[in-house]
Image (cartoon, rainbow, N blue to C red):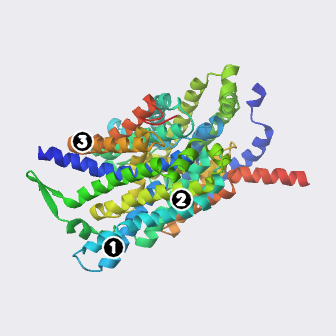
Amino acid sequence: MSGMTAPPRRVLAWSAPVLLALIALPFVVPPYQTVLLSYGLVFAIAALGFNLLLGYTGLLSFGHSAYFGMGAYAVAFVVKYLKVESMELFLLGGIVASGAVAALFGLLCVRYTKIFFGILTMALSQVLWSLAFKFFWVTGGSDGLRVPTPSLLGGFVRAGGDKFDFLSHRYYFYVLAVFVVCATVMWVIVHSPFGKALQAIRDNETRAEFVGVQVWHYRWVAFLISGIFTGVAGALWVPLNGLTTPDILHWTFSGKMVFFTVLGGFQTFFGPVIGAIIYNYLETYAVGHTVYWQMVLGIVLVVLVLALPAGIVGTVRRLGLRFAKAV
Amino acid sequence: MDTLVVHLLNALLYASVMFLIAGGLSLIYGVMRIVNLAHGNLYAFGAYVTAWAVGRVLGGATEASPWLYALLPVGAVAAGALGAVLEPTLLRPLYRRAEEYQLLITFGLLLILEDLMRLLWGPYPLQVSALYEGMGSLTIGESIYPTYNLVVIVIGGVAAAALWAFVYRTQFGVVLRATSQNMRMASALGVNVNRVYVQAFTLGCFMAGLGGAVIVPQQGAVLGMGVDALILAFVVVVIGGLGSLEGALIGAVMVGLVREAGITFFPEIELAVLYLMAAVVLLIRPAGILGRA
């Protein structure tokens, strides 16, 4: 089993050039494109976390906005009350807050599966949304809370200067680095014995239990890890957006997370990552070109579910296999 | 004393509309095992269609003739018709697939319908308050209460009774319950399951549309009303039990009472309390108060 933990050469063979291209990108494309890609990478981190539950544990959460939002609001609160401006402390705040909420909510939710799990996660996330919406003297209500640009790497890279320049270069590299760390950690997790146990639970809960897997406990740990990844994404997202509003706690934002995970293909490791990045482009361009962008997204989703249920990566892989067979 | 009566009536008003929405949602889940995330949008669709139809007939006039009230059900019929189109085209191909996909396609439908209403009726709210004001008000003790609200409460009650009679006292109701209990067995005994599904879905959408149609004179039709209503309808069906009509009734009354009390006594956590109620019921009795697991 331990041999599976190391990334196979095949993955490194294509991910290394992709990573180099991503590093070179800010020097080639206009700054707007790198900021846009930063959003995509942030969502990709959330998708990695989300897919640990959907793809690997077989639990469809409709309440992951709660952990993304907790990450984001934790940052806003440490700025507002503790006057902190270090990104590392932001991330720490996001991890602690989203981890605490995920630990508590997970405790309640993992007793159920299928539709009950989905509705319970949704109901709990809506509790947080309504609190953020109504307690405006703490959370700013629908106006949200502003977050300034942070200093990076313990003050080594100072905050301030031109905000757009900061976001399109220094912050982009920061997001990219965190993304690579998150992807690596998640890769190790899903290929570890723990990850294998989760997949066993997904495929056959009863059998997994008989083999000696403590189903409830494993699901809870998966829920916790998933929530923390999503919280990290939320914490990274706030400085990028400059503002956090209750929208990111609303259940429709959870729906978006489900959307991009399925768009990429939840039965593969990198599917949700691709899905998140493509979804971000899709939404940005749809919003830019028409007021009816929701309809565009809805049609894409309906076509996707009816015609390409395996998602982009899953379909490409299947076509690749068929092609390989034919040759 | 009369303040209490007014509060109770407000709670019942809210409960009637919630029952119409949540009853439809629960019926659809009970028969088809589908959680329709676009259900709230069908409620909004009913509201928009009624507002539009009444507005067209009314023209610029401010006085509502009594005949206009006959136009109220138009929204319900339109929502039912929309449901009758959607089920065979979008949902039927997915019954054999995992339920994640059914949730997703209804989420896609939610996005489409939301913008369809923006496309058809524009971004501004539609009002038909002439119908609301046309009924005047009556005095309860020293308070004044709009007569139209009482009409909505009566419609909610009649709808609940009619639905109960329909499900428990007609031939179609028997087939519906049989399909709900065991789809394969019903199919083996000669029930045309496809037809039952499309009928159940249409009926559920009709009820949601009726909810929208009766409330629109009072509240108007606005974008986003469907998404907000859906999540509260979830609270209702979760409390009462997914798939149970009696449960939806009890859940709607509970949500109506708690919400009215919440608005009066604890406005900041009014919504949070409702969601927490749903979570607590799920934890103690996952199948809801009257649900079967």
- Tell me the kind of residue under disc 3: Ala
The chain under label 1 reads B
Counting from the top left corner in percent of width and height, residue A3 is at 78, 28
The chain under label 2 reads B
Residue appearing at x 22%, y 76% in the figure: B62
Give the SS element for disc 1.
helix
Q: Are marks 1 and 2 on the same chain?
A: yes
Q: Residues within 10 Å of mark 3 (few under 14, many from 20)?
A: some
Counting from the top left corner in percent of width and height, residue B60 is at 27, 80
Of B1 and A206, nearer the camera is B1
Q: What's the CA distance linking mark 3 and mark 1?
A: 33 Å
Report the residue marked by disc 2.
B109
Q: Are marks 2 and 3 on the same chain?
A: yes
Q: What's the CA distance linking mark 2 and mark 3?
A: 34 Å
Give the SS element for disc 3.
helix
The chain under label 3 reads B
- Tell me the kind of residue under disc 1: Val
Report the residue marked by disc 1.
B54
Asked whether residue B137 appears in the rendered view, the answer is yes
Left or right: where does residue B202 sit relative to residue B278?
Answer: right
Report the residue marked by disc 3.
B261
